Image (cartoon, rainbow, N blue to C red):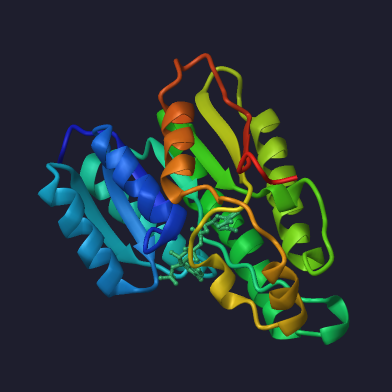
Amino acid sequence: MTEKNTAIITGASSGIGQATAKELAARGYHVMLAARREERLVDLKKEIEAEGGSADYKVTDVTSADEMKSLAQAALEKTGKIDILVNNAGLMPLSYMNKLKLDEWDQMVDVNIKGVLYGIAAVLPIMEEQKSGHILNVSSVAGHQVMKGSAVYSGTKYAVRAISDGLRQEIDPSHEIRVTIVSPGAVATELTDTITDDDVLDSFKSMSMEPLQAEDIANAIGYAVEQPSHVDVNEILIRPRQQP
Ligand SMILES: NC(=O)c1ccc[n+]([C@@H]2O[C@H](COP(=O)([O-])OP(=O)(O)OC[C@H]3O[C@@H](n4cnc5c(N)ncnc54)[C@H](OP(=O)(O)O)[C@@H]3O)[C@@H](O)[C@H]2O)c1
């Protein structure tokens, strides 16, 4: 068993999750990488280890409560504790509601909401037993405001904020368990690849701004987790300077 603090990161195969895994590994955490694309997790584990960090991975679909529980158990077996869970996995197939893309609505509810709930369910009993831990749930600026095309995605991200704030208030005050909402604006990742609605894609063409990089969000997460234990960074709302 290693002596390191352990961080589980879902959606670690790309974008914000990948950058967060590197950031937390560089800060000395043993990182447990989770996503569906195994080859990407293998590469990331190698990259972190080449930099002197410590990483494991477990192929996990966050829409399965059982797989999320197995992920938590695998992390626990390695280091005997779970210090951090970053519930980051998500997808954003934006569309106008009258396109009736029910499959995409289902996917967003399953990954963006249920995935977060299953993550909480997997680690909360362990953190309560430890009397310590930190759960960070990735929401979005879209969890603060709705735009044309974002109705369902925003719905899922508003839900993440509601779930997180409720959880935070329910934590036994004698436990050192913290909950943080991470709400990014536009970040240059693969997230927009899931958009199939041409009207939404057309509306993107007129936008011009310098987006955030995944590392900008990872840095913010690094800040939140390294605060003294009496400090709970409730939410990080972080936009590109040019984003309205
Ligand atoms: N990029 C932005 O502008 C932005 C802004 C605000 C909020 N966010 C949020 O940030 C989070 C990360 O997104 P990103 O921008 O980094 O996008 P990304 O590069 O597309 O990463 C999404 C990650 O989620 C994982 N994922 C998707 N479905 C999954 C499932 N069923 N089970 C396990 N993992 C799953 C993907 O891995 P696999 O496909 O390998 O499973 C991938 O690693 C999301 O929650 C997103 O909503 C992003």
* Residue under the image location 68 percent in, 79 percent down: 104
Q: Is residue 175 above or below residue 143?
A: above
Say which quarter of the image contains residue 12: bottom left
Where 72 falls versus 135 (above or below)? Answer: below
For the point 36% across and 40% down, which residue is it? Answer: 82
Residue 46, relative to residue 199: is it above or below? above
Q: x and y percent of residue 205 in the render?
A: 68, 70
Task: From the viewer's perspective, tell me whether residue 135 is left or right of residue 3.
Answer: right
Report the residue at 52% width, 47% height from top.
212
59 to the left or right of 189: left
* Figure quadrant of residue 198: bottom right
Out of 233 and 166, give the one closest to the viewer. Answer: 233
Please give the count of numbered marks on the rendered protein: 0
User: In the figure, 64 relative to 118: above or below?
Assistant: below
Q: Pick out the residue farthest to the right.
A: 98
- Can residue 131 be seen by looking at this rendering? no
Foreground residue among 240 and 209: 209
Observer able to see residue 185: yes
Q: Position of residue 163 (x, y in %)?
A: 70, 45
Quadrant (top left/top right/bottom left/bottom right) for the C terminus: top right
Q: Position of 233 compared to 11: left or right?
A: right
Q: Quadrant of the N terminus?
A: top left
Whole-percent x and y of residue 5? 28, 34
In-image side of 60 versus 63 (left or right): left
* Nearest the eye: 242 or 235: 242
Seen at 22% across and 66% down, the residue is 42
